[in-house]
Amino acid sequence: MPWPVIASFLLLAAVLWAIPGTRRAGSDRAIAWKCVPPGCAVMLLVPWLITGALWLLAEYVRCFSFRFLNSGPVFFAVTIPGVIAGILLIVKLRNFCRKRYASEGSPRSNGPYWSVFLTLAVLGPVLFFAGGIAVIAVMMNMPGGYHGPWRTYPVAEENGVELAFQERSIHPFLAEYDYRLRFRKAGKDTYRDLWCNAGGQTHVNVFRLSNGRFVFSDKDEDCLADLGTQRVFVLRRFENKFCAGLLPEGPFDRPASVATSGGLPVIHTGRRKLETHVVPETPDRKNYFGRISYGFFPASEKPYQPIPKRW
């Protein structure tokens, strides 16, 4: 959200309207500087408000999918009302200033308005990046570090339980994310934290096993989600079989496994030890259900592509 740009435009207009000399100035150039900045601010603000309302509808009313909101047509559709509202505001303010402050018979020209608009179009990106750097500096020094909002990608709904994958940014500009799964049943949400993606865009393959469980697999880890019990297990390959260890609730350290004398690995997450059991069915291409990348895409839309592990 370009808040630094909007705030700068509104502050400039407020100053010009607050000073008696500039408020009563009746030349087209002076009027343009009083009218165009708030109009440009509205052009940026209205699309953001519309987009926020659509995201709330997608999250709670489920009128449409999040993938629909990320599409190009939606971007242009929400931009048009902002442009119209901004132009109308500029025209209304211009007509008011000309009637109130301009002398009769003074020349009229739209050139100053275009000049001010183009000037703000050049200054806008500069203000955005300057303000963004300032915001980043503040956020990076906040207690607990930087966290963006959670983005929700519904994956499946079976037996009255909805399973969704959620991610949030943990760095202002690098591709680093927290992951978690959300189980929703009868309006009640249960969250299970997953691993942290410490670098790289989100690419997760989703598999559905014949017993109804789901496997999420990316470049770092694999996990098994059970909708019936709303539990999540970390999966590790060990001697040509998959072993699952129940993940603890809340944040945990990155899992690391060691072999035991009993023949099955014990998965360590910090000081915690997770006993494992063998998973009879392992995720394979034939179980491929879909892919998560800026939303969830079913197998019919994004064919299977393997994701090599980093470790």
Image (cartoon, rainbow, N blue to C red):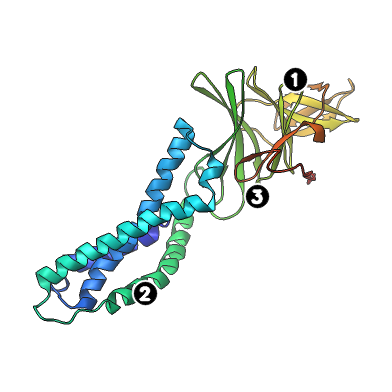
Task: Name the quadrant containing residue 179.
Answer: top right
Judged by depth in the image, the label closer to the viewer, 3 or 1, is 1
The answer to whether one can see residue 145 in this image is no
Q: Quadrant of the C terminus?
A: top right
Label number found at residue 201: 3
| Of the pair 268 and 5, the residue shown nearer to us | 5
Residue at numbered disc 2: 119
- How far, Cα to Cα, is label 2 from label 3? 35 Å
Residue at numbered disc 1: 211
Q: Residue at x 79, y 22 (%)?
A: 276
Q: Secondary structure at mark 2?
A: helix
Task: Name the quadrant containing residue 257.
Answer: top right
Q: Is residue 251 left or right of residue 275?
A: left
Q: Tell me the kind of residue under disc 3.
A: Gln
Q: Residue at x 60, y 46 (%)?
A: 294
Mark 3–mark 1 contact, CB under 8 Å? Answer: no
Q: Tell me the kind of residue under disc 1.
A: Asn
Q: Tell me the kind of residue under disc 2.
A: Thr
Task: Name the quadrant containing residue 173.
Answer: bottom right
| Of the pair 110 and 228, the residue shown nearer to us | 110
The answer to whether one can see residue 29 in this image is yes
Q: List x then y, in percent, for residue 273.
A: 74, 25
